[in-house]
Amino acid sequence: MTQTIPHDIEDAAPAAQSGASAKKVFVKTYGCQMNVYDSERMGDALTRDGYQPVDSVEAADLVLINTCHIREKAAEKVYSQLGRLAKLKQQRNEEGGDLMVAVAGCVAQAEGQEIIRRAPVVDVVIGPQTYHRLPDALERARAGESVVETEFPAEDKFDRLPAAAAAAIRGRGVSAFLTVQEGCDKFCTFCVVPYTRGAEVSRPVGKILQEAERLAQAGVREITLLGQNVNAWHGEGGDGREWGLGELVRRLAKIEGLDRIRYTTSHPRDMDDALIEAHRDLPQLMPYLHLPVQSGSDRILKAMNRRHTAEDYIRLVEKIRKARPDIALSGDFIVGFPGETDADFQDTLRLIRDVEYAAAFSFKYSIRPGTPGAGMDGQVDEAVKSARLAELQALISEQTRAFGRGCIGRTVDLLLEKSGRNTGQLVGRSPWLQPVIVDAKAGQIGDIVSVRIMQTGTNSLFAEPVGANGDQPRSEIV
Ligand code: SAH
Ligand code: SF4
Ligand code: F3S
């Protein structure tokens, strides 16, 4: 799903009720942005139920772990965490207290009952399509039942999850996620997502607009539309016609205060002309596109069931760049898919050199039980995977640095998002998603300011403000 930016994010829901009597929840989120969004929505439901968020396991009555199953390492992390929680629960019980543990997300969906068998500390296992049942599941668990909710119910969870309160939205910052599509029908042979998230479902236009308007009214300036295959989103538009993501973005761009729109993750096969035209026409649609290709070898792409060739991808990138020349591209790559030879890997490197990415995420192929890839011949040695990954990442890093250097001297708009490490500095995002550090006052968070990029750092860029009257920066490091 997701980009699926594969990192860990801790997140806690905002408080609706305080005081010593409130039940306290600690939420730990793994995996992609959709899990971040889901954790927020579950947090909202728990807040309405009287829970208060806390930022440590020790302070919590309930620990909710939102899990990711995409690679073996991600899934195994959950069990080491559950081991630690078992000790804490035992300690609590000895002191006459208690601790409840709920496991949500894609590991919950994939493993279900097995989680409780391996880790009896768990009270509730709840899959991504049943989050609206979490308060009820906790109630049943409190009565002594061990609850596993992993079916794909007919009812729409989004309709039953409470909308975030304006205060909660504000607490989460000026950039927000909004799920518009969930699930996947593509069945790439390496991937668990079609099994953990289910079939592709698009949320209706009216619901999306309502949520986007609420976010904008609460001060959100940027939304990132989420979907496992977000550009497969479709729905009946306000004009009675069938809309695709391009039309949806066009409508969202009319919402007062929403100055920036992004979307992730896109599949190359679903990049249609209307979406490309939206990139050409809409200043609100940021010139950044996460378009995973996974491999540059046609043989491997076929075995992965990606259903396009490397050449198709290159042509598509050319078409997108023609419509929006300053667009930055990012991608995902898997090295060591079964049967990948050195020649296949060289094809991937060649594609990367041809495309020139601003950023990319790359992974060693990880066998996922139940996927077709797991049973394929020609599994690649770990050492070979590691060597290929290192080579690919070196190339991508060089491209990312070159992209950053190319920004030096340019004047860009920055959405100021949060305080920097040093007082008097804020961190904002460039249109190309780079973190940029600039001198600014805390009160400017949420402003979009014009800055001149001066220097590149390890993970961010440094900029100077450009005066409202168009003053040039004091110095230039070029
Ligand atoms: N829906 C998105 C992303 C899915 S998961 C898409 O279609 O691109 C995010 C990324 O994780 C994938 O793009 C892929 O690069 C990686 N990934 C998925 N399954 C994997 C596996 N079994 N081993 C290694 N990487 C994997
Ligand atoms: Fe997984 Fe492929 Fe679906 Fe992406 S398109 S979620 S990689 S099956
Ligand atoms: Fe996201 Fe991981 Fe599930 S990437 S969709 S949380 S398997």
Image: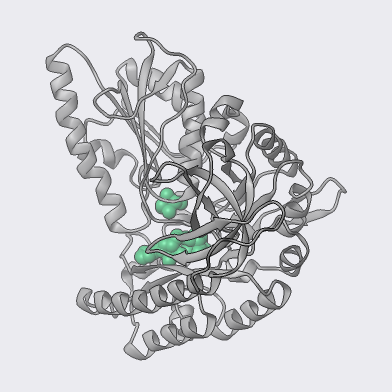
Q: Nearer the viewer, residue 23 or 229?
A: 23
- The answer to whether 185 is drawn above or below residue 173 in the figure is below
Q: Is residue 248 left or right of residue 326?
A: right
Q: Which quadrant of the frame does ligand 1 lie within?
A: bottom left
In the image, what residue occupies the spot 22% across and 30% down?
A: 121
- In the current view of this chain or complex, which residue is farthest to the bottom? 343
Which colour assignment does the render follow?
A: one colour
In the image, what residue occupies the spot 26% across and 35% down?
A: 116
In the image, what residue occupies the spot 51% across and 68% down?
A: 330
Q: Nearer the viewer, residue 36 or 377?
A: 36
Q: Nearer the viewer, residue 410 or 194?
A: 410
Q: Can you see residue 181?
A: no
In the image, what residue occupies the spot 57% across and 42% down?
A: 176
Q: Nearer the viewer, residue 28 or 229?
A: 28
Instruction: Name the image quarter holding residue 245.
Output: bottom right
- The answer to whether 162 is drawn above or below residue 390 in the figure is above
Q: Position of residue 404 (x, y in %)?
A: 49, 70
Instruction: Name the image quarter holding residue 65.
Output: top left
Q: Position of residue 56 (x, y in %)?
A: 29, 29
Q: Is residue 466 left or right of residue 380?
A: right
Q: Can you see residue 84?
A: yes
Q: Is residue 75 left or right of residue 457?
A: left
Q: Position of residue 308 (x, y in %)?
A: 57, 78
- In the current view of this chain or complex, which residue is farthest to the front? 474
Q: Position of residue 401 (x, y in %)?
A: 43, 72
- Total marks drawn? 0
